[in-house]
Amino acid sequence: DLLRRRHPGIALASSHVGSLGGLMAIGKGLCHLAGTHLLDPRDGSYNINDIQRHLPDVALDLVHLVEREQGLMVAPGNPLGIHSVADLAREETVRFCNRQGGSGTRVLFDHLLRRAGIPPTRIRGYEREEFTHMAVAVAVASGAADAGLGIRAAARALELDFIPITAERYDLIVPRRVRSLPALSLLLELIAGAEFRRRIEALGGYSAAQSGTTVYTSPPRGE
């Protein structure tokens, strides 16, 4: 809405395809930019290793958008006493709502299960997939699920309880072939601005201190 208000002639169209889907779309030239928050469980880093693996020949910049909290969203008052991923393995009582394969949140959840030594078969509802954080929050708020992994802002929007698990980086992949386009330049300028940062942090669970900063370039400039 900030972009629309400041530059009425520019429209931002987005699709929810997950972080891995965004990388694939960049590689095929289907979009101007893509959001990503892919955890590499081997070293705890975000995004860069997957970019190097899947987009080795694409000249791009990785622009930081936000850092945000991921955690378990549960009903108000946490009636089932869910406090960790291990509590989700109570198959007879806890119904879980998952994110789709290829999403950064799914990658994170699978990593958390492996770290806890819990096979997916012990999670009731592991196969139930939604495509956005808000869709998972709606499932919990409506009583269709008891818990789901998602961001604090989604839990806050629907007045759910939130058990924080980790903080993650959410970045934007911007191919350098399009970065100089006027519309992209204006969008990135807005992301680095004070009003954007203030409004993002007001949502809860976000830090926008480094928003708009280029954190990685691939391949290195000049190559």
Image (cartoon, grey):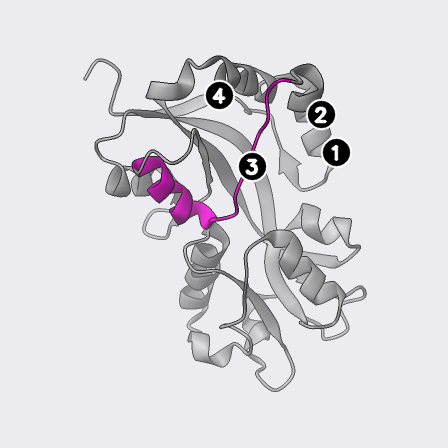
Label 2 to label 3, Cα distance in Å? 14 Å
- Chain-order first, disc 1 or disc 3: 3
Which residue is depicted at the point 56% across and 34% down? 13
- Residue 14 highlighted magenta (yes or no): yes
Which residue is depicted at the point 42% across and 33% down? 31
Q: From which residue to which does the magenta span run?
A: 9-27
Badge 4 is on which residue? 213
Label 4 to label 3, Cα distance in Å? 12 Å
Q: Secondary structure at mark 3?
A: strand
Label 2 to label 4, Cα distance in Å? 16 Å
Question: Amino acid type of disc 4?
Answer: Thr
Label 2 to label 1, Cα distance in Å? 6 Å
Badge 2 is on which residue? 198
Residue 136 placed where, x, y %? 63, 60
Q: Are marks 2 and 1 in contact (CB under 8 Å)?
A: yes
- Residue 183 highlighted magenta (yes or no): no
Question: Amino acid type of disc 2?
Answer: Arg
Q: Which mark is residue 202?
A: 1
The answer to whether any part of residue 38 appears in the image is no
- Residue nearest the viewer, comparing 139 with 112: 139
Question: Amino acid type of disc 3?
Answer: Glu
Residue 157 placed where, x, y %? 76, 49
Q: Where, quadrant-wise, is the N terminus in this rendering?
A: top right
Question: Amino acid type of disc 1?
Answer: Ala
- Chain-order first, disc 4 or disc 3: 3
Which residue reaches farthest left?
Answer: 223
Q: Which mark is residue 67?
A: 3
Characterize the local packing of mark 1: few (<14), some (14-19) or many (20 or more) Cα atoms within 10 angstroms.
few
